Amino acid sequence: MHYNWIFLCLKISTFALMEFSSKLLENAVNEMSQLPGIGKRTALRLVLHLLRQPENQTFQLADALSKVRREINFCKSCHNISDKVLCEICENPNRNSEFICVVEDVRDVMAVENTSSFKGLYHVLGGKISPMDGIGPQDLNISTLVEKVKSGKVKELVFAMSPTMEGDTTNFYIFKQIQGYNVATSTIARGVAAGNELEYTDEITLGRSIIDRVPFEASLKS
């Protein structure tokens, strides 16, 4: 075990000290390695792979990334990623605007949509309350959600946050903010294992959790 640790350290040190034959290559690897889950070795493989591809393919990738950064919008109603002022879900007249599914981020919208079990609208908070990470309610899209409830047009909020301590804290904070208003609150059934991130839950389990949602007050007693 001790020798394996030493060997790993030597491998890391060797790579860290490796001299690149090109400063351009080194810069590209350094930038690529800043992506989540991408280390220096993987970054090097990816950059070398791009160099082996036809030139136009690399340019198309660069152009797509540039456009998504410069031209992407966030829906003014639900904060989902959109090409326009309002996203396609919010613009869809067949969606039930009286039901709002509250999720952490865009990936969770995609996860719930893949279940085909929810026909209402969404509200993307942009994160979850996490004092350890310095994220408070003011850093999230909570105030706009409360305004929707105050308008009286929403009948039910479905809390579809990941069943973690931070997710439960966020649910409870919102619940306290809207008490006194005529709106029902429910949370997805605990078919989703506690501690799991919503985006990694399979569609069947997540779909059943949406359909079998329970009143939020009841979840506080469990």
Image: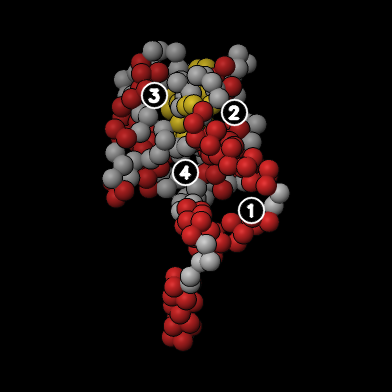
Q: CA distance from mark 4 to mark 2?
A: 17 Å
Name which residue lies at 68% across and 56% down: 52
Q: CA distance from mark 2 to mark 3?
A: 18 Å
Whether 152 is drawn above or below 25: the answer is above
Q: Are marks 3 and 4 in contact (CB under 8 Å)?
A: no
Whether residue 51 is visible = yes
Name which residue lies at 60% across and 13% down: 93
Q: Which residue is mark 2?
A: 118
Q: Residue furthest bottom?
A: 3
Q: Which residue is mark 3?
A: 145
Q: Are marks 1 and 2 in contact (CB under 8 Å)?
A: no
Q: Residue furthest right?
A: 54
Between disc 2 and disc 3, the foreground one is 3
Q: Residues within 10 Å of mark 2 (few under 14, many from 20)?
A: some
Residue flagged by tag 1: what amino acid is it? Answer: Leu
Q: Are marks 1 and 3 in contact (CB under 8 Å)?
A: no
Q: Give the SS element for disc 1.
A: helix
Q: CA distance from mark 1 to mark 2?
A: 40 Å
Q: Residues within 10 Å of mark 3 (few under 14, many from 20)?
A: many
The answer to whether residue 51 is left or right of residue 90 is: right
Residue flagged by tag 3: what amino acid is it? Answer: Leu
Q: Which residue is mark 4?
A: 162
Q: Which residue is mark 1?
A: 50
Q: Give the SS element for disc 3.
A: helix
The foreground one among 4 and 138 is 4
Number of marks present in the image shown: 4
- Quarter-of-image position of residue 84: top right
Residue flagged by tag 4: what amino acid is it? Answer: Ser
- Earlier residue among tags 2 and 3: 2
Name which residue lies at 35% across and 33% down: 140
- Earlier residue among tags 3 and 4: 3
